[in-house]
Amino acid sequence: MKILVCISKTPDTTAKIAFTDNNTKFSEQGVQWIINPYDEWYALVRAIELKEKDPSVLVHLITVGGADAEPVIRKALALGGDEAIRVNGGGHDSFYIATQIAEVAKQGAYDLVFAGKETIDYNGASIGGMVAELLDFPFVPLAIKFELNGSGAVITREIEGGEEVCEVALPVVVSCQKGMAEQRIPNMKGIMGARTKPLKVVEAVPVDALTAVVSFELPPAKAGVKMIAADNPEELVRLLHDEAKVI
Amino acid sequence: MSVLIFIDQADGQIKKAAHEVICYGARIAEMLGTTAEGIVLGTVTDDLAALGKYGVKKIHHVKSEQLNQFDAQVFANVLAQAVAAASAEVVVFSNNVDGKAIAPRLSARLKAGLVAGAIALPDLTTGFIVKKNVFSGKAFANVSLNTTIKIISLNGNSYPVTETSGSSEVVSLNVTVAGAKVKVTSVNKVTGEVPLSEAELVVSGGRGLKGPENWGILEDLAKALGAATACSRPVADAHWRPHHEHVGQTGFAIAPNLYVALGISGAIQHLAGVNRSKVIVVINKDAEAPFFKAADYGIVGDVFEIVPKITAAVKKLKGI
C-alpha cells in the first residue's frame, strides 16, 4: 500500500496579507510559512495513522515548489511519512501543479492520493479533482472519515446538509477535511528523524498554465462598527430592517 | 457557441443555488453575445422549462437514472460530452459541494482554465478576467483565463437573482454514461433545518453561551429570522453542537447576507470562515472582543438578556 500526500506551503493564518509590484505579487515580507492546515491536520495525519496501524503502508509526501518549500516539507516529515518528493517548479496554476503531482503518482504507482480540501491561500479546492482526472481515478471530495477495507476504502464525505458513506476500490484520490484526523504536534524524535529522511527533487514536466493571476486587491475597509446600546436591542432589528435591509 | 450552466439538483429538485448561477451564466452569455444553455443530470420532478425566467434559453436534460447518484468522475465525463454538444465556450458551476468535485475534473479533462470561487462577472475589456476570493476571504485575485473553453465556479451569494418572464426549451441529451466506481452505501441528511451552505441568514454561537443547554435562545432567534444555526470551533470541539455547524478556517466557509455572532470573540480563524458575510452583527459582553472590528453592528452586553429581546422585536416586525 502506497499513499501519496499532497503538501502545500501557505502563509500562516495570522499572516498580514499585502501585495507588492503594483498589486501583482503577494508580499512575503515577515510571512511565516506553514503546511496548509487541510494538508497537515487531515490528509497527512490520517495517512500517518494508517501507517501506524499497518507498518507496511508507505507514506510519501509531495510538494510542488522551489527550494524555499523544503523547510515546510521537512516539517511535514517530522510528523511522519517515509520520504518526500519536491517537484522543482513554481506558479499557482492548479492545473500545472496537479499535472506535476499526477506525473509522480503515475510513476510511483500509488494506491491512494490524499490532498487537503483546499489551500488557505488560493482557495482553489481543485488539486484533488484534477489529479484524479489526470490519473483517471475516482475522486471522493470533502472526506471526513476514511477507513481501508481490503482492496478498497470506506469513506464518509460531506454532502449538502449532511454526509454520505461510500465504498470505492483503490486506487482513489481523496480530498480531506475536518473529521479525518486530529491535529498533531511533531515531537523531538520526529523532528530529528525528519532531517535524515529522503527528500528527492525531481524536475517539473513541461506544461502550460491554464490561468494566471493578473492582480490582487484588498477588500474595501469596513465602514466601522455601529454600536447599539445594550438596553435598546430593538434598535438593532430596526437597523437590520431599514438600513442594512437584510431582514 | 454557448455558455453552459450546470444546473444542480438534489432528490429531483433544482437547488436554490442553481437560480443564482443561471442568472450569472445568462448575463455572461449576454456579454458575449451568445446563448445561455443549461445542463441537468438525472431524474427531476421540477419544471425545467420554468427556469427560463432566470435567463436560460435551452436546457439539455440527461435523464439517465444512473445520474441520480452523484459521482464526480461520471458527471465530469457526461459534462464533457455536453460541452461538445452545446459547443460551449464558457461553463459555469456553483462553487458548492458538487461544483467543487466536478469543475476541477472537467478543467483537467478539457484543459480548460478554471476560476474556482468567482465572485463577480468576468471583465472582458482585456481578455477574460474573473475576480475570485483568495487568502480565505482576506483578498481578491483577478485571474485571467487563457484557454478557449473557460470554466467558472461561482461562490454562493455573489450574484443577484432576478426573475423575468420566459420559458426555456428543454431537450433530451443522449450521452454515454459510465458506471460509477464510487458506491454510496448510506446517506444521512439533516432534515427540517435550513442547510448552512444555502442559508441567507445565519445565527451562530460561541463559548459565551456557556453550554449546550443554553442554545434555546439562539434557536428561537434563528427560527424567528428563518435563519440557519452555526457555531464556533470550540463549541463543535466540545461537542456542544454538531461538527457540520462549525464555521471558520477549518470548518465551513459561508457568505450569508446576515451573520449574527453570539458570544464569539472572533479569532482570526473564525473570521476566515465568515468574513464574506454581507452584514455581521456581534453581540458579546467583552467590549474588547476582536470580532467588533469586523462587525457592521455591535452590542456589548449579556447575550442571555439581549437575545430574547431581539427575538421578540423580530417577531413583532414580522407579525409572528
Image: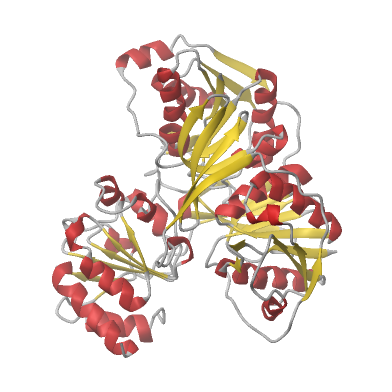
Q: Quadrant of residue B167?
A: bottom right
Which residue sits at x=63%, y=24%? A88
**In terms of depth relative to the viewer, which is nearer, A36 or A56?**
A56
| Left or right for A161, reference A131 | left
Give above or below for B96 relative to B36: above
**Where is the C terminus of chain B found, in terms of image quarters?**
bottom left
Give above or below for B205 relative to B111: below
Which residue sits at x=61%, y=67%? B18
Give above or below for A99 relative to A187: below
Q: In the rendered image, is residue A93 in sight?
A: no
Q: Quadrant of residue B241?
A: bottom left
Residue B14: percent from left, percent from top: 61, 68
Residue A72: percent from left, percent from top: 46, 26
Q: Work out which residue is located at the far top of the displayed protein and give it.
A: A196
**In terms of depth relative to the viewer, which is nearer, B274 or B206?**
B206
Q: Work out which residue is located at the far bottom of the displayed protein and give it.
A: B319
| Left or right for A165, reference B163 | left
**In terms of depth relative to the viewer, which is nearer, B202 or A2?**
A2
Which residue sits at x=66%, y=20%? A109
Residue A26: percent from left, percent from top: 53, 44
